[in-house]
Image (cartoon, rainbow, N blue to C red):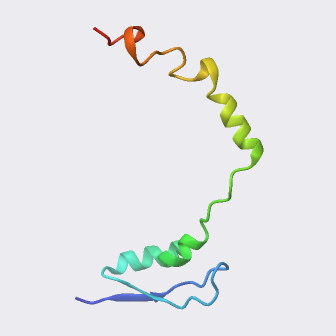
Amino acid sequence: MKKWKRNCPNPDSNPKCEKELSYSRIYERDRAEKQNTNCNSCAKKGKKRKPFSDEWKKNIGKSVSGERNGMYGVHRFGENNPMYD
């Protein structure tokens, strides 16, 4: 089986990467070149998550507190439980 090869396009996040990527089908290699895709390690370096801000944490806390919480007013134990027999 013939292997089609190309090099990682050296993204800004990792200019030292010179990995050789191999493909079993020529159209997969051509699609990857057209879309300028990186190797897996370079692709993951660009997707590091940023920590959540304090303002975001406060807003998310307000959005699910009190009556906006789906479990607000539900009693899960004892006679107040709707499933209690």
Q: Nearer the viewer, residue 83 or 22?
A: 83
Quadrant of the drawing holding the N terminus: bottom left
Residue displayed at 72% across by 35% down: 59
**Residue 77 x, y percent position in the rendering:** 40, 17
**Residue 36 x, y percent position in the rendering:** 54, 76
Check the image and report above or below for 71 versus 29.
above
Residue farthest to the right, as pictured: 55
- Left or right of 58: which side holds 45? left
- How many numbered marks appear? 0
Residue farthest to the front, as pictured: 78
**Residue 6 x, y percent position in the rendering:** 45, 88
Q: Nearer the viewer, residue 15 or 48?
A: 48
Residue displayed at 42% across by 19% down: 76
Q: Would you identify the image quadrant in which residue 65 lies?
A: top right
- Left or right of 77: which side holds 58? right
Residue displayed at 52% across by 71% down: 35
Q: Nearer the viewer, residue 75 or 63?
A: 75
Quadrant of the drawing holding the C terminus: top left
**Residue 41 x, y percent position in the rendering:** 51, 77
Check the image and report above or below for 71 versus 59.
above
Q: Would you identify the image quadrant in which residue 25 lies?
A: bottom left
Check the image and report above or below for 61 versus 30.
above
Q: Nearer the viewer, residue 29 or 43?
A: 43
Residue displayed at 72% across by 42% down: 56
